Image (cartoon, helix red, strand yellow):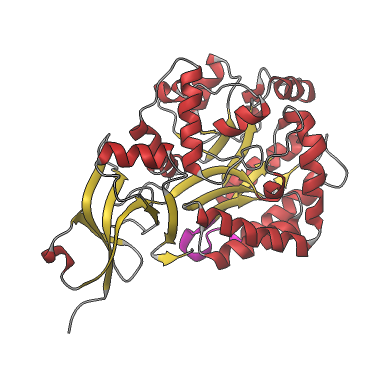
Amino acid sequence: MGGPLKTGFRGKVLTACADAAGLRYLEDGLVVLDDQGRIAEVDAYSLDLARDVTVRDVRPWLISPGFVDAHLHFPQIRVIGSASGPLLPWLERTVFPEEARFVDVKHARTVAEELVQRLASAGTTTAVLYSSSSPQATRVLFEMLSQSGIRAIAGLTLMDQNCPDALRVPADRALEAAAELVQAFHGYDHGRLAFAMTPRFAPTCSRALLEGAAQLAHDKKLYVQTHISENADEVDAALEVHPWANDYLDVYEKTGLLGSRSLLAHAIHLSSSEWDRIRDHDARVVHCPDSNFFLGSGRHRLSEPQRRGIRVAVGTDVAAGRTFDVRRILSSAYDNALCLGDRVAPADLFRLGTLGGAEALGMEKAIGSLEPGKDADICLIELPDYVNGEANVLSRVVFGSDTALVRETYVRGKQLV
């Protein structure tokens, strides 16, 4: 009798590695999966390696780690490309009316189905999501995520002031609803789903709501996600609403929201002091270059967190971001760096969208690279047969997503699309 059945993909292989700075590339490689959906072996193809493995030959396609999208908004996906001004007017004119529609559970379910399909089709295997402020819509989102097989962190968006009445939920009710959702979904399917406390941003949250969110996050060991310093007017609004804070970061600092499971999106208009304190709290930053371009919010200088050792992920930030494709965000990050006179190597960008994202989420032992023992969160990318060699493949994946098409996506070895 043989051992447990193993399956494998034969093709080009490109991956970051946990214990090395560069990438590993195999022109003709084999990624072997065990029957538990974990990666068993990754090496150059050989008959010995393929023995007792059911091999699927996908050449000339590329076998890649799935991509990590660390910031996007579930209830905004149908208003992608709606240009109506900088951040605060855009929220008022476009986003808040759209999010108010999610009191309709049927509508929420339809959009949630669309969401998971769009994510998987882009090769995204892990997504960090803002829901609406509706507990019912957020429950629908989690139900769809649980059924889809995708890996996700999501949360009920918290807003108890300075927003339309249709979206405002008093702090006590919002925190009670969040606690119920935590009980129902946090840690589901051996940790495939997780809950994040999700104060939208400082202007729409009272101090009591922020402190309550921090306490629940601490008690239940939850993620925290929010926005910080995306737009200069937003910074002014945050300090006007919270005059007791010395700067924007201080709002989150004094309310206890900062730690190693805190994800701070945008981080454009920060002082050196704020950057240093983010490092001191071991908080994480999510770079969203496409939405920063689209709303004219400013330029995030990636070197600021990197030189301090702050972990960074990237986010599409749909709907201010105009694509679900993390690879297009990596290309946008390259353009953003050039605008600032900086340079980011393509290999570093690829790592940022895969293993770097996993590291920012504290998931690097389970996902982010094609290495034995990790979950088989994989996407298969169709490449033209004339694209060969590490440099060409890497450039095509990062900068040529229109000719490097995601064909299949897997989480824990189970196909999503």
Residue at image location 58% in from the left, 61% down from the top = 145
Residue at image location 46% in from the left, 20% down from the top = 338
Residue at image location 68% in from the left, 24% down from the top = 231
Q: Position of residue 319 (x, y in %)?
A: 66, 42
Q: Position of residue 206 (x, y in %)?
A: 77, 35
Farthest front residue in view: 386
Q: Is residue 192 magenta?
A: yes
Q: Is residue 65 above or below residue 147?
A: above
Q: Position of residue 359 (x, y in %)?
A: 41, 41
Quadrant location of residue 43? Answer: bottom left
Q: Is residue 392 above or below residue 274?
A: below
Q: Position of residue 333 (x, y in %)?
A: 48, 30
Q: Is residue 137 magenta?
A: no
Q: Is residue 24 above or below residue 406?
A: above
Residue at image location 36% in from the left, 58% down from the top = 375
Judge left or right: residue 322 versus residue 411. right
Tell me the magenta residue range: 184-193
Q: Is residue 372 visible?
A: no
